Image: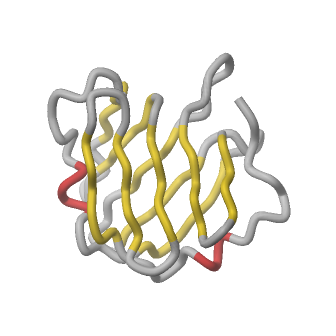
Amino acid sequence: MYFIPKEFDFSQLKGDYIQQICFSINNIVLFLERKGSIKMEGRFTLSDEHGNLCIYETYPVNKDFGLLKLLEQRIEELNTNETRSDLIISFENGFVLKLLGEEGYESYTLNIGEDRIII
């Protein structure tokens, strides 16, 4: 596992929309309208507008995990935890997606423009 670089500029994703969500047996990819994609391969949490939180394991993909509620939703805020291993994405509908970085394997990949960050 790697970490989100300190120089990574979150503002380039702010205001973008989730345009498409693709599911495969081993990963889930969120395609952004303008900037790129986020490939999820590990654990994540999703909380709804009421703060109800669920923890999920991406593999095996056998349901939508509630992620379809992120379609056409604008990204309002992006943050990391102190170790810069987790990415926290807040959406306009009140949902919060937290991608959890795990030691020992790659958990998620950010493809933003020509930049690629593997966590």
53 or 64, which lies in front? 64
Residue furthest out toward the right: 7
Q: On the rendered structure, is 46 left or right of 68?
A: right
Q: Residue 22, image x and y in percent? A: 27, 50
**Outermost residue, front side:** 114
Against 24, residue 13 (above or below) is: below
Q: Is residue 11 left or right of residue 30?
A: right
In the rendered image of this protein, does residue 104 appear above or below residue 55? above
Q: How far from the left and from the top, in percent, is residue 78?
A: 57, 64
Relative image position of residue 2 (x, y in whole percent): 75, 36
Looking at the image, residue 50 lies above or below residue 53: below
- Asked if residue 79 lies left or right of residue 38, the reply is right
| Quadrant in the picture for the N terminus | top right
- The spot of residue 66 in percent (x, y) is 19, 46
Identity of the residue drawn at 46% across and 75% down? 76
**Image colouring:** secondary structure
Give the side of residue 19 with respect to residue 7, left or right: left
Quadrant housing the C terminus: top right
Quarter of the view holding residue 84: top right
| Residue at the far left in the pictured view | 63
